Amino acid sequence: MSAFLRDAANKSMALTKKPVNGMKDILPEEMAIRNYVIQLIRETYAGFGFSSIDTPIVEHIENLLSKQGGENEKLIFKVLKRGEKLDLSKPTTEEAVTDCGLRYDLTLPLSRYYSNHSNELPSPFKALQIGNVFRADRPQRGRYRQFTQCDIDILGDPGYLAEIELILATTTVLGKLDFHNFTIRINDRQILKAMAAKAGFAEADYDKVFIILDKMDKIGWDGVRAELEEAYSKELADAYLSQFSTEETEGLTENDLAIMNEVGSTLPVIINTVDAVKTADFKVKFDPTLVRGMSYYTGPIFEISMDEFGGSVGGGGRYDEMIGKFTGQSTPAVGFSIGFERIIMLLMERGMRVPGANEKTAFLVEKNMDPEKLADIFREAVAMRAEGRTVDISLMKKNKKFQKQQLTDTGYTEIREFFNR
């Protein structure tokens, strides 16, 4: 074989060491913070009565494409059929060769889970689910194609107590992680629909109107007005936008309360109760421009805005109709998802160290150590570990200074050296 062909063959066999675009490897320092935050979340939410569950990362394709996930349904990683079910010998369609896909969130799998196990679960059921989800999205700061979601949901409670519990539980976690002065923005899908109806939009146009309104943070009032006028008319745009206040206000205005009373919204009770009993440093603010992208929301919706990130770090809302798509029976449901990846990113940028971590000691052992001395070293390590300390035993390297610096950088506060002499 010529040198050219040999080099070409070697190149074709080379493996790629970087992860797939939009996904990432997690180094030990970040993993320690992730584990700490997950443990804190589990302990905090358990105190509110939430029970941990888990669901498969793979879902039936018909569930994922049931027109409940909004734009996320365009971002599904689909899985090919296997074995005899997969026939690629003739022209076919994507739908014909796929039968499942990777979940794009945890809400749809939870709804399937509850519909399958409701007879075995209490009512209302308070669920905590932490797991990876997948979206074929464009990667950017704080946004990945594989990421961890952390959801709490209350199923079977039709009233506002569930919303209050979800907001208090989520903000308690953020308070324990030393986040301050963030905002819980809250709205109601019924309010959105009432304002669109009052302006004169047809019900069939609501989703399109809300998609335009949802761009408020990116294109501002003028941009929203221009898109509404282009899609409909200046008269409809004026009638719709005149119902919104463009000024920052503290608390609920008379116009806010009038809109809420019109649709029987429970937002005043939710806002006032949360504000009265909260333990973290945040504001609850009614925001009639808040939309949330998922089409399955039916009532109150909420989002966490944090200046430190410059956007949303979590959100959720009520989705009373989703479980009924599986069972044929309406079941009230509401959930709140904390933006786990973005929270971890902010903690990493702060230079966070895991509080209360075990004291870490490193033993550096000279090569060819006497067996009896080596046994004594391991006995000492066993005794220290039994006391709750972290002990690492490694061979001493030639570049000992660099080795010790690496250990220090990874949190080892004591480094001991062992020699034969």
Image (tube, rainbow, N blue to C red):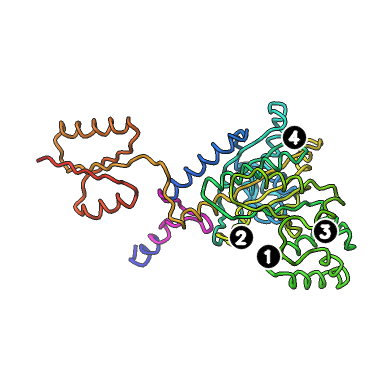
Asked whether the beta carbons under mark 2 and mark 1 sit within 8 Å of each other, the answer is: yes
Residue found at x 78% / y 35%? 327
Q: Closer to the N terminus: mark 4 or mark 2?
A: 4
Mark 1 or 3: in front is 3
- Indicate the amino acid at tag 4: Gly
The amino acid type, in three-letter code, at marker 2 is Gly
Rendered view: 299 above or below 330: below
Residue topped by disc 2? 311
Kind of residue at disc 1? Asp
Label 3: which residue? Answer: 255
Disc 3 residue crowd, few under 14, some 14–19, many 20+, Cα 10 Å:
few
Examine the structure image and report whether residue 31 is included in the region drawn in magenta. no
The quarter of the picture where residue 293 lies is bottom right
Tell me if I can see residue 295 in this picture: yes
Range of residues picked out in magenta: 10-29
- Pointer 2: residues within 10 angstroms few (<14), some, or many (20+)? few
Q: Can you say which quadrant of the picture contains the N terminus?
A: bottom left
Q: Which residue is mark 1?
A: 217
Reading the chain from its start, which is encountered first: label 4 or label 1? 4
The residue wearing badge 4 is 156
Disc 3 marks which amino acid? Answer: Asn
Give the Cα separation between the discs numbered 2 and 1.
9 Å
Alpha carbons under labels 4 and 2: distance apart:
31 Å
Labels 4 and 2 touching (C-beta < 8 A): no
